[in-house]
Amino acid sequence: MSRRTILAACQMGPLQRAEGRPAAVARMVALLEKAARMGASVAVFPELALTTFFPRWFHEDLREADHWYETALPSNETAPLWEAARRLGIGFHLGFAERTPEGRRFNTAIYVHPSGETVLKYRKVHLPGHSEYDPIRKVQHLEKRYFEPGDLGFPVVRAPLGGPGGETEANIGLLICNDRRWPEAWRVLGLQQVELVMLGYNTPSLNMENRGFEAHHLRVEHSVLSVRAGCYQNSCYAVAVAKAGTEDGHELFGHSVIVNPQGEVMAQATTWEDEVVVAEADFTRCELGRTTIFDFARHRRPEHYARIVEQVGSVAPPRWSPAER
């Protein structure tokens, strides 16, 4: 069986607060159709793709934010996306806000097979921002208020992708936004021989914490650097897809990318609009790094890594001082 397939990054332009799910879904269906015409077997959409990035607003009562969450998928409003995937024979990744029957709230992503079945679910682990209104910030970032840290770990599953050339299987894992900056997340996926990481993000062009200057161009550089490093160090492909442009008055930088197991950018979005970029993946190319420099069975030394899992915050090292004479 061929291990080649076409991957599509389906970047979305801004989704304003006043726009509803039907508008978002219609745009996503159009992107899915374009990805299929370009020969893609799987399309990756951004984090929280069905709504604006609502954690920028503070609600005292969490119930006031309930309308941003999905309680079941597909719903009547989102069903056209599932129908399009079945019609086109293409799988897709979707990021959304999830509210469970018990009332728990998660920043969630799923991979949906062309048949419409959910193959894999992931809930964002590394939540940035804060939980209470912060007057020092120019814009709030309240993910810690609106979401719990994910409780599903970092699962990987071997599953078929769709596409006009027949199905290609790959070891699939999911990350969301800030997760891409944490090497621990990539390594847990890598230890399960992940071959394709799908991740969505909504990242502002400016650091809004107002605690020091960060050059605008470095925001993009650090995003791409994180994905490239994760792919290289774990011998996998990644499709990292953003929302972009001025959303409710706040700029998101976009720059969606597809990266190969050597850490090279294969394709990158060049607009702040709805845009599809594609690249061909050959999953046999994941084997080189996995059997040489990153052959974990031969080269990892977990007996020396205890600090990574036992310690949360950083601590100062002991101070050296010269010997007394």
Image (cartoon, rainbow, N blue to C red):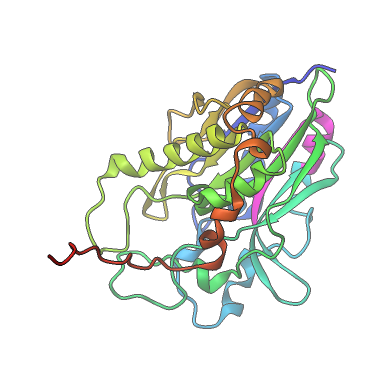
Expressed as whole percent of the image width and height from the top left, the position of residue 228 reads 49, 34
In magenta stretch: residue 145 = no
In magenta stretch: residue 87 = yes
Q: Going by the image, does 256 lie left or right of 197?
A: left
Residue 264 visible in the snapshot: yes
x 75%, y 36%: residue: 171
x 30%, y 65%: residue: 138
Q: Quadrant of residue 288?
A: top right
Q: Nearer the viewer, residue 110 or 55?
A: 110
Q: Nearer the viewer, residue 27 or 165?
A: 165
Expressed as whole percent of the image width and height from the top left, the position of residue 137 reads 31, 68
x 48%, y 29%: residue: 269
- 92 above or below 133? above
- 162 above or below 175? above
The residues colored magenta run 82-96
Q: Which residue is farthest front?
A: 325
Expressed as whole percent of the image width and height from the top left, the position of residue 258 reads 55, 29
Q: Going by the image, does 322 lie left or right of 183?
A: left
- 63 above or below 83? below
- 67 above or below 291? below
x 54%, y 25%: residue: 262
Expressed as whole percent of the image width and height from the top left, the position of residue 255 reads 44, 35
Q: Quadrant of residue 292?
A: top right
Quadrant placement of the N terminus: top right
